[in-house]
Image (tube, coloured by chain):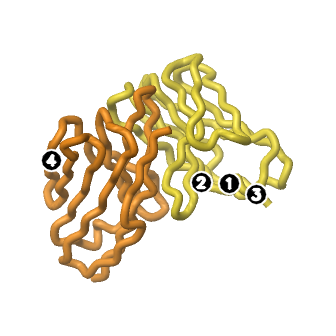
Chain colours: A orange, B yellow
């Protein structure tokens, strides 16, 4: 079945440093979504990428979808303590199932 | 709007007991999902329902059953709870196959 792998599992950064998490799928994806989960909370949708090579920005967050539509990345520029949480990518199977990666937990030291 | 509502929020079960986790959404979404979240494992799909009356197994369906009672409600049943089912369970819904999922607040289940 479809698998979505995400690395790294954990990342500790100093406030102001950049952060990147990477997502790879075993199959070609129709689209990829990114979610953020704050400690003790539930996942909240951030963005969806659909097109091959697509790049989208949300303030300090940059999302990329690979040319082959099998990988994606999330880059945060100049992290802040409010960025703390776990970031998940999720890909849709051709039957509509939403499969999540293992997530990357970001900790930011002030 | 309440969005996606899960009950209960916390539950402790003894091994072998049964229980049903309830989920309801008020957004008129077609698709609904049940996930479990364990440390280091991310969110793993248990069951998926594309529409009322249909269900499909996810990545980890063993030990669980589901019912899509109507368009609003999607319940998850543990017939004979095991310690390995200790986890945080999330229900989610989405309008369609290509759109964002909205999550409930989660149910923290402990099986002793």
* Residue annotated with mark 1: B109
Kindly identify which numbered label has been placed on residue B83.
3
At mark 4, the secondary structure is: strand
Q: Nearer the viewer, mark 1 or mark 4?
A: 4
Kindly identify which numbered label has been placed on residue B22.
none
Label 2: how many Cα within 10 Å (few below 14, some 14–19, many 20+): some
Separation of disc 3 and disc 1 at Cα? 10 Å
The image shows residue B59, relative to residue A109, as above or below, that is above
Q: Does B80 sit left or right of A58 as displayed?
A: right
Q: Callout 4: residue from which chain?
A: A
Task: State the quadrant of the N terminus of chain B.
Answer: top left
Residue B47 pos. (x, y %)? 58, 35
Residue B17 pos. (x, y %)? 84, 47
Q: Nearer the viewer, residue B98 or A30?
A: A30
Separation of disc 1 and disc 4 at Cα? 37 Å
Kindly identify which numbered label has been placed on residue B88.
2
Q: Nearer the viewer, residue B1 or B83?
A: B83
Residue at (20, 71) in percent of width and height: A18
The image shows residue A12, relative to residue B37, as above or below, that is below
At mark 2, the secondary structure is: strand
Q: Are marks 2 and 1 in contact (CB under 8 Å)?
A: yes
Residue A46 pos. (x, y %)? 28, 48
At mark 1, the secondary structure is: strand
Circle nearer the N terminus (3, 1): 3
Kindly identify which numbered label has been placed on residue A56.
4
Q: Nearer the viewer, mark 2 or mark 3?
A: 3
């Amino acid at each position: 079945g479809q698998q979505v792998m995400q690395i790294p599992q954990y990342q500790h950064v100093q406030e102001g440093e950049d952060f990147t998490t990477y997502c790879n799928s075993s199959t070609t994806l129709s689209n990829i979504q990114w979610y953020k989960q704050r400690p003790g909370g539930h996942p909240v949708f951030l963005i969806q990428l659909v097109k091959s090579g697509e790049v989208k920005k949300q303030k300090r967050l940059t999302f990329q979808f690979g040319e082959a539509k099998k990988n994606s990345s999330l880059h945060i520029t100049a992290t802040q303590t409010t960025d703390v949480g776990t970031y998940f990518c999720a890909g849709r199977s051709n039957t509509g199932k939403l499969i999540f990666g293992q997530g990357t937990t970001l900790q930011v030291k002030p | 709007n309440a969005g996606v509502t899960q009950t209960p929020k916390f539950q402790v079960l003894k091994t072998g007991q049964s229980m049903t986790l309830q989920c309801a959404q008020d957004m008129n979404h077609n698709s609904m999902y049940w996930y479990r979240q364990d440390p280091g494992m991310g969110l793993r799909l248990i069951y998926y329902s594309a529409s009322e009356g249909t269900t499909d197994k996810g990545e980890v369906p063993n030990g669980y059953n589901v019912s899509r009672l109507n368009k609003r409600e999607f319940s998850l049943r543990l017939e004979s709870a095991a310690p390995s089912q200790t986890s945080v369970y999330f229900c989610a819904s989405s309008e369609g196959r290509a759109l964002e999922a909205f999550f409930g607040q989660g149910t923290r289940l402990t099986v002793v």
